[in-house]
Amino acid sequence: MTTAPADRPRIPDAITDPLSGRRISLLDWQAANRRASWLLAGFMVLLLGGIGYLVALAFDPGAAWTFIVIAAVMAIGQSLAAYWFSDKLALAVSGARPANKDEHRYLVNVTEAVAIGAGVPMPKIYVIDNPAPNAFATGRDPRHGAIAVTTGLMSILDRQELEGVVAHEMAHVKNYDIRFASMLAATVGAIVLLRDVILRGLRFGGRSRRSSSSGGGRGQAIAMVLLIVLLILAPILATLVRLAVSRRREYLADATGAYITRNPDGLASALAKLRDYRGTPMQVSEGVQHMYFTNPVAKLNALSWLATHPPIDDRISRLRRM
């Protein structure tokens, strides 16, 4: 990866899925991620619109359209914010600063070489001043990609290992994983936000007393039960889907990154060093933990159903069998 000859072979259009063993077309995977992003945005509008309708039935049936419109506007706003601003938010929350070409020439050169190998535009490069080794990628598409690495990562990895990590993160952007993950996170966030608003309203406002008939009272009671069940289950189910999707994408990014560098051992060696790191862990917001190369929460059990990443030893084993 230190040179990029003109006759270098192109990245294959398909890779082997580390989970199923089947060949996966990268172009089909990218297209599926793009479709899923917009379908998810549409689903969020319908879901929050439905929640708004139940809110109207439970609190004030006469204002049904008002609640539906408010919920739909909230969903559209969350989707647009996730699409346009999720990268800036993730970088700001992580304390990342733009890399300086003079100060971080080594990192810039590595990233340029990997971008050539991946066939994508050069992403923006950021540095996080933290001794814990880690990295993450963000950006809605390859033309707006950004990669952030910690100073600790640069200090413990050699060039081949750093190339492997950068290639892994670049694979997330190349495969449109970041856009889909941002939209999914926005869905969870919008549901949780609406749930908190409704629960606060229940605590301080109570239900509307407009409907005095027994039929209306029963209808409001049923709507209230359905609303509470939906508000409890929807964030849990959406979070479980997000975690499962995140773990699968980590495996595929490992495989794609190994193909980009033509060196699975470099990425495996980098994972081993991060696994063996015993220094002070990073303090990272829960909302961006899933974006990192390895989960910054050192004590999180990777076998847990709450884990955002597959077990590091399993990732290493799969890479060394490639």
Image (spheres, grey):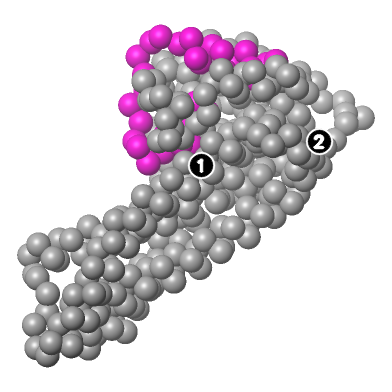
Between 289 and 227, the one lying in front of the other is 227
Residue at horizontal 33%, vertical 70%?
A: 51
Looking at the rendering, which quadrant does residue 200 occupy?
Answer: bottom left
Looking at the rendering, which quadrant does residue 252 occupy?
Answer: top right
Looking at the rendering, which quadrant does residue 95 occupy?
Answer: top left
Q: Residue flagged by tag 2: what amino acid is it?
A: Ile
Sequence-first disc among 1 and 2: 2
Mark 1 or 2: in front is 1
Which label number is shown at residue 11? 2
- In the rendered image, residue 290 lying in the magenta stretch gets the answer yes
Q: Give the range drawn in magenta.
A: 265-294
Q: How crowded is mark 1: few (under 14 residues within 10 Å), some or many (20 or more)?
A: some
Between 284 and 207, the one lying in front of the other is 207
Q: Residue flagged by tag 1: what amino acid is it?
A: Ala
Residue 9 lies left or right of residue 114; in this view the side is right
Q: Is residue 113 visible?
A: no
| Residue 42, x across and y down, in percent | 51, 68
Residue 223 lies left or right of residue 36; in this view the side is left
| Residue 246, x across and y down, in percent | 52, 40
Which label number is shown at residue 113? none
- In the rendered image, residue 67 lying in the magenta stretch gets the answer no
Answer above or below: position of 292 versus 66: above
Between 85 and 220, the one lying in front of the other is 220
Q: Mark 1 points at which residue?
A: 244
Residue at horizontal 38%, vertical 25%?
A: 300
Between 45 and 83, the one lying in front of the other is 45
Q: Is residue 322 visible?
A: yes
Q: How crowded is mark 2: few (under 14 residues within 10 Å), some or many (20 or more)?
A: some
Instruction: Kindly state the secondary structure of the residue where label 1 is placed.
Output: helix
Residue at horizontal 13%, vertical 65%?
A: 202
